[in-house]
Image (cartoon, grey):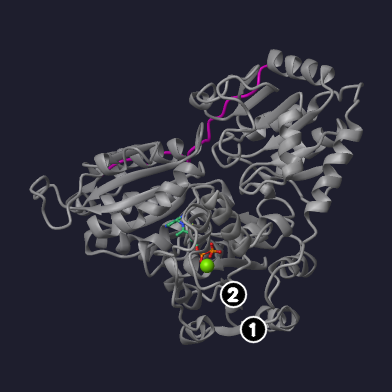
Amino acid sequence: MGQSMPARTGAQILVDSLKIHGARMAFGVPGESYLAVLDALHDARTQIPFIICRNEGGAANMAEAYGKLTGEPGLLFVTRGPGASNATVGLHTAFQDSTPLIMFIGQVGTDFMDREAFQEVEYRRVYGSMTKWVAQIDRADRMPEYVSRAYHTAVSGRPGPVVLALPEDMLTQTATVADAGRYQRVAAHPGAADLRKMRDMLGEAQRPLVILGGSGWTEQACADIRAFAEANELPVATGFRRANLYDNRLPNYVGDVGIGINPALATRVKTADLLLVVGSRMGEMASSGYTLLDVPRPKQKLVHVLSGAEELGRVYQADLPIHSGMPELAAALRAMTAVQRRPWVEWRDGARADYERWLEPGPMPGAVDLGAIMVHLRKRLPPGSIVTNGAGNFSGWVHRFYQYTGLPTELAPTSGAMGYGVPAAIAAKLVHPDRTVVAVAGDGDFLMNGQELATAAQYDAKVVFLVVNNGMYGTIRMHQERDYPERVSGTMLKNPDFAALARAFGLHGEIVEATKDFEAAFERAFNASTAALIELRIDPDAISTRTTLSAIRTEALKRKNK
Ligand SMILES: Cc1ncc(C[n+]2csc(CCOP(=O)(O)OP(=O)(O)O)c2C)c(N)n1
Ligand SMILES: [Mg+2]
């Protein structure tokens, strides 16, 4: 058998391994350091198209979005030093968002290694704190082993990013070696005693609340959780930027526990007597700065389910910690007999009523009302549409007023990274060509990866980009006016004409300066033969869904002069 096996280069063994593990596309920016991989990808171009990007930061965000969309590792290829450095933002997001991703770096050859040769970096040190594993593959014959371990590491337990460095000479070395099999995700299952105890706790509760979050979910797992929640008539909330884990239109969905949480929901989280937290770490953003649950011992009874054992007990001491994958837990909950006594139906309906009130936008200064635009998109976008965003105050309108219709319809960085929404939307359109994809970006946020409009044009990814232009880094300005009123520093922006910019990339572009013009502009963008961009010129005073910049400034001045 071994005799008939052909010798292959390290690069060919790598690409063959990726095919075996089910790769459907890869993202990156080329480098002379991994020409042999590019050559092997040439042979595999129908199975694994290589999506070339304009900055590794864009490519890394696309790979991260691919991981979020599919549950399989997003693949990223970058060159050494400069390329790898640009990609870091995507690794950080994959780490914080628990998204499976594998980054391959074309590394300096072993002949020059450790001399600080051209663009040489020691990746184990650089990426040690924001990846699950970093390694360098020094022998072509160990390629199947390393790639298999990378896939297993990225998807198992708490998912996350992995980095593999590929010395240039190893990629052209030949070896005769058997391929590994396809990877298998390894997950813990909830024990029978855990499930009995959980059901007993539910049976004793008066005011229970389910909070869904984290990664590792599948459409089936979401359907199973829904069946469990409906059978037990439970209210369901979602974590920060995880609102698509539950169809927001369902009558037992009660909102998300993100930044700018509905105060009524915050009160309910605090006064619940049982929290079933499934998948969410209840990190700083989901816990309103660790105020919703006491650290380390919450007042509420807590059932905490996480896929990584090392995360259980890290911040919160749960009454019942359960180590389980999300699909495994959800299937067990669906199979569980519903509790008979359910004194919380009124509590659930009250929570839903709080949410529905929160969904109604109030007045907003200026001629373009983002709340009204989100309400329009809620009605206009077909179910299953994917809405992406990066970081900035503009995202507050999306998270509060748009309704996500189930997994996977939301791509947003829990890491709070600006520049995410544009590349994530392009990846979404490539993975799901039949779905409508809308990216919402701030003016600051957009230009962090706006160069990827070229990628949208090149691959004909028909995304509708909405750029919310308030002429500033609004989030920072908001904090600035609160702490240093009337001392604007480092937060004002002079912007390009975004619509003209889109047209320069060969896309459709237009500007909306009044709410009433949005509907027609959106139809033109939606029906355009290319991707399209709409710049929304909003009033800088409209700083959030709840307050204005001038109100914040006045408050701060009053405090200061007291
Ligand atoms: C990559 C990155 N750099 C800086 C920040 C800090 N930051 C958070 S929000 C923000 C401003 C966002 O501005 P914009 O996109 O225009 O949205 P706005 O708040 O004005 O709606 C900045 C600079 C960040 N979160 N991510
Ligand atoms: Mg802005």
Q: Which of 254 and 312 is in front in this view?
A: 254
| The residue stretch that appears in magenta | 176-191
First in sequence: mark 1 or mark 2?
Answer: 2
Q: Is residue 432 left or right of residue 48?
A: right
Amino acid type at circle 1 is Ala
Residue 339: % across, % down: 87, 22
Residue denoted by label 2 = 462
Amino acid type at circle 2 is Lys
Residue 15: % across, % down: 37, 53
Task: Decide: few, some or many residues near mark 2? Use Cα within 10 Å; few <14, some 14-19, many ≥20.
Answer: many
Q: In this view, does 504 lie above or below 152?
A: below
Residue 238: % across, % down: 69, 42
Residue denoted by label 1 = 528
Q: Nearer the viewer, residue 445 or 533?
A: 445
Q: Is mark 2 on a helix, strand or loop?
A: loop
Task: Decide: few, some or many residues near mark 1? Use Cα within 10 Å; few <14, some 14-19, many ≥20.
Answer: some
Tell whether label 2 touches label 1 (CB within 8 Å).
Answer: yes
